[in-house]
Amino acid sequence: MSIDHPPARKGGTAGRLLGLTLLAVLAGYGNPAAVFAQPKPYLALADRLDRPQDGYCIDIAGSGDWIDVTIPLAAHNCKGPATYPDQAVRYDPASGQVRFYRLQVCMTALGRNGRSLAQMPLLAQPCVTPHVSEPLPFASAALQAFDFRSDGRLELRGSGLCVVAGASSDTTFSPADKWRALQMTPCTGAPAALSVWVRPPAPSGSG
């Protein structure tokens, strides 16, 4: 998991939901360069920027056995050689969902009435099935529907807004790790280095 949230408390079972906080027991942190040496189900920037050894992947905040979905998603250096639940995703082109399949949450643009705005962050929220009762008051399938454009950018369906990483980076609680902000930004004019993503695999079977 991300080394970007100080240890708060231990215990709990992997994937257990406490309110809006997920607890998960994760494996040890290996050599991050191996992420690109082996296929990984991660959503990574095509440009590795200031992390030539591993690049940046969309990441849920967390540390140790703590994963916190109340904190906005970020671009964090990609992790390996194991596959990490807080970065492992499947992309379903039909629904547009980017699903953190080990945690059963989906990448979600923050918004109202199914619409987002520029500069809004993204969260990991319970996945919404279209045309089915929504699990939370502000949940919306429309805010979880993302399309890969031909230029590699990831657009919130029909909105003209794309998922874009921040121009600056900083270390986390570990000086070996770095992160960048993540937000919705108009696709037009978004720097390619911060907005072109490597498409993750589609779900197999039920996902």
Image (cartoon, rainbow, N blue to C red):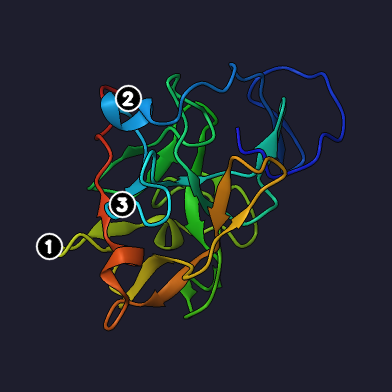
Task: Describe residue 121's horizontal placement relative to residue 6 as left or right.
Answer: left
Residue 73 picture location, percent across and down: 56, 53
Q: Residue at x 25, y 63 (%)?
A: 153
Query: Would residue 112 be seen by someone viewing this image from the given angle?
Result: yes
Mark 2 crowd level (few <14, some 14–19, many ≥20, 10 Å Cα): few
Task: Describe residue 147's horizontal placement relative to residue 31 as left or right.
Answer: left
Mark 3 crowd level (few <14, some 14–19, many ≥20, 10 Å Cα): many
Q: Select label 1 or label 2 by which is in front.
A: 1
Q: Is residue 123 above or below residue 101?
A: below
Q: Which mark is residue 96?
A: 3
Amino acid of disc 3: Gly
Query: Number of numbered discs present?
Result: 3
Q: Residue at x 72, y 17 (%)?
A: 13
Separation (CA) of disc 2 from disc 3: 15 Å
As rendered, which of 207 and 27 lies closer to the eye? 27
Q: Is residue 65 above or below residue 127?
A: above
Residue tagged by mark 2? 206
Q: Is residue 59 above or below residue 115?
A: above
- Pick out the residue farthest to the right: 9
Mark earlier in primary sequence (2, 3): 3
Amino acid of disc 2: Ser
Separation (CA) of disc 3 from disc 1: 15 Å
Q: Select label 3 or label 1 by which is in front.
A: 1
Query: Would residue 123 be seen by someone viewing this image from the given angle?
Result: no
Q: Residue at x 47, y 36 (%)?
A: 87
Q: Which mark is residue 66?
A: none
Amino acid of disc 1: Ser
Mark earlier in primary sequence (3, 1): 3
Q: Which mark is residue 150?
A: 1
Separation (CA) of disc 1 from disc 2: 26 Å
Task: Quarter of the image for the C terminus: give it.
Answer: top left
